[in-house]
Image (cartoon, helix red, strand yellow):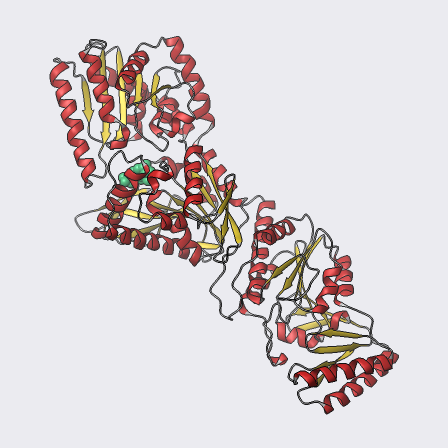
């Protein structure tokens, strides 16, 4: 990992490597085969990616390490956590609940506590790992609370979530005692991906039923506690796939083709080899498949000399009761069928309770005439896609359950309702009897789909959609007691549009009451740390993309001293009469426009104001190069009113105007305003879009010169012509932070990165 963190962080329950600990306690690892890791490897390498996940064993501590161009960050779980978070809540509560309650879900409060605890650990690991403004992609049902936990820790990052398994209908999901917490957990993401449109629709309906957030199409308007929509969350389908080219190439390899031939021979060269490949899981419909197959043998519609069924059932979640029961049931059924129908040299079913490396799977697929995917419910089912990718010979038939995600996509498979045993028998027999022509026709259609929509396209589409989401800062914990809201969704969109401008963006802001909270003693006014960070970020953009300007009524020297603006910031002081730029040693004055006549007028003004100040306690005069200012904020109400009146009378006597703000009356000797100065600056720079932030009446002049491609924001209460309003200095800082991020994002996009 670089010092600044990783631009892309994947968070999944498991790391993409298997760990082993030898007798001496030495830990070693080897890459575990998996579609997800091969899909993400290229983007991970390009984006300096990290993968946060569990190493698969209890109490195994390991430091982050580099593997294949990415950083792997192991998360440690102890034995209790494995029991309660992984076997319990993930695989004995959520898994059955999300798979149509095929097995009864168990609800235990201790399991929920462990789930929350472990989710927080994953969120914290990701928060440490990810770079400023980076992207975190969280995977699957084991980690549904991570998005919101992470957002709390790192409001600056983009968060995507992908649910690999089905999302159930509301009526089933509603059984979960912690249903609201799970939904709120997921809604921490900007983008939530599902396998099928139906899953996304179930989720959106659940959001409408359980929360007050409204939805429009696939977009949820996420509301803060005050009921204001502050950001968008999108829920859409992104059907996952496999490394199709890779699998196709593997299955064409000479050794794999030879192994396929060998498998046929070892099985006694039957006419038809049928194949089932599954994790030994009750959702896969293995029992239904075996039942249908047994009945076909019983009915004499298939015979053991001509047909055999190979069932690969890889061990899975063996400490969970429902899986142990399933294993007993499957093995009993296989034993009975083999006993009833098998003959010497002709087993009815070859049952293999192992997992195999990809080479062997590819050979099995090539050797098989029919693959049976009969899941009762399945997020996608990648066995179906692997089989298709392996059949570059355009042969074979796929029996596919309607209840898989794959059924939505794979036109050309023989679809079936696995609960209907008679139909299942008919479809299996039909598949066994498909003519080579029919097989070819169907397989070609299937291959067109699978070879085009591969897993690289899936991850690219997801990440591009995520990058395109408007990302809004979440209201932070506040240090200065200011109002808490971040910018509204409309304002965020306007800022994103501004950042997307082709050409220079001028980011201009008043100082007091916008970047610095108002304080009693104007000399102690300072840019808030949060605003300073946001300004720093904008200042780091190339000068051709963004320029920063502070526009203030303060004189230039004071503005430079108090604001401590980043190097290169343009300064407009004294309402436009003074201009400068921040340098390493202070500031460079650009021009001061005071003639002799103006200087003598200014002397009269200053004397007059001093005289007024002398008559009222708490009233004082500030001298600026082109104006003098009467301050009344420390005076009594009546005193302030009288002093203000006297200053106005003085200005009238001298034939000049006044510029009045909050508890100040300024009398200038040059004809300028923040509006005139801003307009001149924009022209000089050739800025295409301008953001202006102001809190005072004098800022209205600046708002007035803005056009439709600009964004005007009033900070705090009071009448305004600005288009947007935020409540205080913290929200102003948040808004600048967002703009900084949006500008960075834009320039990354232009340079072809991200
Ligand atoms: C499904 C889930 C994955 C999970 C896999 C294997 O495909 O969606 O998240 O990793 O099963 O299950 P296991 O419990 O062994 O991780």
Residue 219 screen position, x and y as percent: 51, 42
For image coordinates 45% across by 44% down, the residue present is 208
Residue 444 screen position, x and y as percent: 44, 17
Q: Quadrant of ligand 1?
A: top left
Q: Is residue 203 above or below residue 518?
A: above
Q: Is residue 502 above or below residue 558?
A: above
Furthest residue in direction bottom, as rendered: 614
Residue 237 screen position, x and y as percent: 45, 35
> Seen in the image, is 528 located left or right of residue 318?
right
Pick whichever, 668 or 720, lies toward us: 720
For image coordinates 67% across by 74% down, the residue present is 559
- Res 15 seen here: no
Pick whichever, 348 or 328, lies toward us: 328
Residue 578 screen position, x and y as percent: 76, 72
For image coordinates 73% across by 91% down, the residue present is 615
Q: Is residue 297 above or below residue 721?
A: above
> Seen in the image, is 306 located left or right of residue 142?
left
Pick whichever, 526 or 107, lies toward us: 107
For image coordinates 61% across by 72% down, the residue present is 564
Q: In this view, does 1 lie above or below 532?
A: above
């Amino acid at each position: 990992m670089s010092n600044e963190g990783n631009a892309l962080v994947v968070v999944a329950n498991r790391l993409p490597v298997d760990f082993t600990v030898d007798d001496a306690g030495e830990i070693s690892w080897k890459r575990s085969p998996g579609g997800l890791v091969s899909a993400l490897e290229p983007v991970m390498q390009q984006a300096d990616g990290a993968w946060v996940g569990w190493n698969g064993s209890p109490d195994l501590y390991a430091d982050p390490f580099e593997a294949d161009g990415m950083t792997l960050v192991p998360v440690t779980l102890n034995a209790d956590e494995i029991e309660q978070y992984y076997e319990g809540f993930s695989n004995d509560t959520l898994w059955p609940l999300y798979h149509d309650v095929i097995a009864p879900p168990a609800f235990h409060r201790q399991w929920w506590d462990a789930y929350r605890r472990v989710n927080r650990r994953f969120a914290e690991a990701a928060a440490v790992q990810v770079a400023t403004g980076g992207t975190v992609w969280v995977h699957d049902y084991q980690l549904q609370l991570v998005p919101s936990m992470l957002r709390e820790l790192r409001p600056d990052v983009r968060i995507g979530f992908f649910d690999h398994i089905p999302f159930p209908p509301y009526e089933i999901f509603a059984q979960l005692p912690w249903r609201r917490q799970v939904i709120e957990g997921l809604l921490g993401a900007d983008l939530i991906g599902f396998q099928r449109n139906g899953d996304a629709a179930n989720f959106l309906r659940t959001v409408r039923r359980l929360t007050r957030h409204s939805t429009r199409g696939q977009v949820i308007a996420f509301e803060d506690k005050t009921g204001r929509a502050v950001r968008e969350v999108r829920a859409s389908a992104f059907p996952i796939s496999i490394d199709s080219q890779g699998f196709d190439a593997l299955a064409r390899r000479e050794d794999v083709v030879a192994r396929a031939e060998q498998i046929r021979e070892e099985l006694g060269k039957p006419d038809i080899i049928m194949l089932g490949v599954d994790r030994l899981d009750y959702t896969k419909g293995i029992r239904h498949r075996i039942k249908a197959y047994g009945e076909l043998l019983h009915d004499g519609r298939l015979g053991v000399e001509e047909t055999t069924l190979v069932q690969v059932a890889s061990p899975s979640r063996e400490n969970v009761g429902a899986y142990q029961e399933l294993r007993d049931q499957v093995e009993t059924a296989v034993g009975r069928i083999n006993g009833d129908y098998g003959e010497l040299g002709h087993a009815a079913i070859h049952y293999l309770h192992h997992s195999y490396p990809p080479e062997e799977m590819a050979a099995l697929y090539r050797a098989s005439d029919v693959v049976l995917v009969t899941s009762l419910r399945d997020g996608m089912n990648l066995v179906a896609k692997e089989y298709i990718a392996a059949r570059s010979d355009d042969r074979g038939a796929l029996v596919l359950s309607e209840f898989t995600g794959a059924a939505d996509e794979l036109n050309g498979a023989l679809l079936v309702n696995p609960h209907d045993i008679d139909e299942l028998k008919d479809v299996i027999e039909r598949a066994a009897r498909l003519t080579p022509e029919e097989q070819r026709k169907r397989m070609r259609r299937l291959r067109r789909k699978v070879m085009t929509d591969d897993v690289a396209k899936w991850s690219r589409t997801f990440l591009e959609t995520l990058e395109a989401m408007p990302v809004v800062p979440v209201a932070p914990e506040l240090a200065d007691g200011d109002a808490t809201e971040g910018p509204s969704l409309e304002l965020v969109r306007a800022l994103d549009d501004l950042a997307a401008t082709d050409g220079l963006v001028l980011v201009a802001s008043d100082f007091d009451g916008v970047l610095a909270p108002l304080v009693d003693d104007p000399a102690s006014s300072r840019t808030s740390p949060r605003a300073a960070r946001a300004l720093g970020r904008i200042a780091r953009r190339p000068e051709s993309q963004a320029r920063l300007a502070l526009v203030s009524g303060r004189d230039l020297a004071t503005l430079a001293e108090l604001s401590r603006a980043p190097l290169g910031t343009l300064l407009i002081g004294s309402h436009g009469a003074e201009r400068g730029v921040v340098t390493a040693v202070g500031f460079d004055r650009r021009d001061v426009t005071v003639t002799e006549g103006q200087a003598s007028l200014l002397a009269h003004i200053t004397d007059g104001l001093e005289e007024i100040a002398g008559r009222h306690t708490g009233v004082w005069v500030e001298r600026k190069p082109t104006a003098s200012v009467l301050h009344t904020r420390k005076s009594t109400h009546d005193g302030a009113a009288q002093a203000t009146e006297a200053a106005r009378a003085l200005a009238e006597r001298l034939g000049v105007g006044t510029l009045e703000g909050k508890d100040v009356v300024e009398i200038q000797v040059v004809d300028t305003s923040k509006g005139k100065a801003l307009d001149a600056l924009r022209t000089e720079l050739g800025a295409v879009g301008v953001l202006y932030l102001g809190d005072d009446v004098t800022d209205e002049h600046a708002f007035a010169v803005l056009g439709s491609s600009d964004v005007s924001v009033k900070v705090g209460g009071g009448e305004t012509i600005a288009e947007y309003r935020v409540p205080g200095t913290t929200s102003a800082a948040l808004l600048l932070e967002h703009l900084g991020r949006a500008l960075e994002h834009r320039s990354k996009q232009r340079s072809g990165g991200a």
